[in-house]
Image: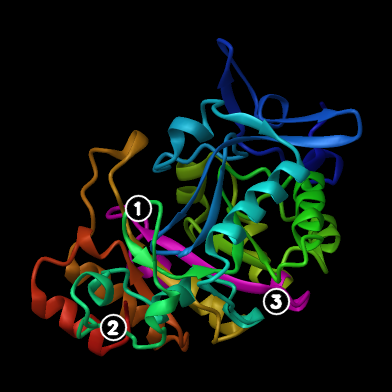
Amino acid sequence: MICRLVKEGFKPGSCLTFSEGLWRPACEVTFRWRGNIPYRLIHSYAHKAPEQYLSIYQSGCNWSCLKCHSWRFTKYASGYWVSPKGIAEIAMEYVERNRVNMYRENRKRITSWHAHELCRGCGSCIQKGKRSIYCPGKLSINHITILDDGTYGPARNIISFTGGDLSCQPKFYIESTREIKNLNEDLWVLLETNGYGLIPTTLDLFEGLIDSFWLDIKAYDEEIHKKLTGVSNEWILKLPAEIIDRGFTLEVSTVYIPGWVEEDQIRRIAELLAQVDPEIPYSIIAFLPENKMRNIKPPSFNQMFKALNEARNVGLKNVRLGNLGLFITKNEEYELLHKLKAI
């Protein structure tokens, strides 16, 4: 299979995936055609916190991130083959299971970021019969259900593709989205992505189909980005403008990795986003030691707090911190972030 990115004048990804004793390109081992129908290797799917929507976890990826917490199935082929019609069946199962309590978001809120404005996932309203003092108070108890991970929250009308990213093979996402929309269940489709496959022709193909992108910008510095992912970020830094110009919904995240991606790079990413649209939701996520970076500790509260201020000080209006349990050690730290609307 000839790399589609190369055919379009871009460089190939860092996409080798292990399958049947060999390392081969992800598009050869986790994507295939059967006749004229595209299939994708799907590891699993779940309705979980904090996103509070249905996440479909894909095997195989066009990057090789040192910090990837999903490496067990993104770099090692794992799962079962699913067609676009099969994806629609998964989506319909989610709808049927949550039809009574489905929470319907508008187009501007097709993000993980906005889930935090709805529910903290604590379950206090169900388990104790009263809301937590931190409850946003936006939902009636009728919208709260138990999620697949044992937490509580709403079932939002969003279907997300996550895990490994093969947006460089757009046909599967195009056909899957069409099948989901043909259900006529008022479902939004979100693609969680590293952005590498979202070249101009792919974005054009996605217009009118994919509704939203959650773009994870790994680093601003190109050399650090190459070390982290195996590829350049030259195109990635142009993507926010490309996505917004086409009318898609966009949210962005960056993982704070001590010694690698700290306040200086987060500030530069935030500056870039603010120039495109200061309203873009941005999440700064605390690093979780995983994969080939298990020797690096998570950031401290002070580091995360400084990063938050850096991002807000350059004009970005909607900034939150994520993976709170990795850096908050005192109740007063949580109280401060809650007061600042940073969680």
Q: Label 1, secondary structure: give it.
A: loop
Residue located beneath label 2 in the image: 135
Left or right of 29 in this view: 169: right
Is 334 part of what is drawn in magenta? no
User: Start and end of the magenta stretch?
Assistant: 243-268
Q: Earlier in the sequence, mark 3 or mark 2?
A: 2
Q: Which mark is residue 260?
A: 1
> Quick one: SS at disc 3?
helix
Closest to the observer, 223 or 104: 104
Name the residue furthest top: 21
Residue 292: image tag: none
Q: Which residue is mark 3?
A: 244
Sooner in the amino-acid sequence: mark 1 or mark 2: 2
Give yes or no for contact between labels 1 and 2 (Cβ–Cβ under 8 Å).
no
Front tag of 3 and 2: 2
Q: Position of residue 27 (x, y in %)?
A: 71, 32
Rounded to the nearest whole Å, what is the CA distance between mark 3 and mark 2? Answer: 31 Å
Q: What amino acid type should be assigned to the residue bearing mark 1?
A: Trp
Q: Camera-side residue: 132 or 37?
A: 132
**Residue type at tag 2:** Cys
Tell me how far mark 1 sits from mark 2, CA to CA: 34 Å
Amino acid type indicated by mark 3? Ile
Label 1 or label 3, whichever comes before in sequence order: 3
Q: Quadrant of residue 338?
A: bottom left
Q: Residue at x 61, y 52 (%)?
A: 93
Tell me the mark number nearer the camera, choosing from 1 and 2: 2
Query: Going by the image, does 89 lie left or right of 128?
Result: right
Location of residue 50 in the rendering, given as x and y in whole percent from the top left corner? 39, 64
Q: Quick one: label 3, few (<14), some, or many (20+) residues within 10 Å?
A: some
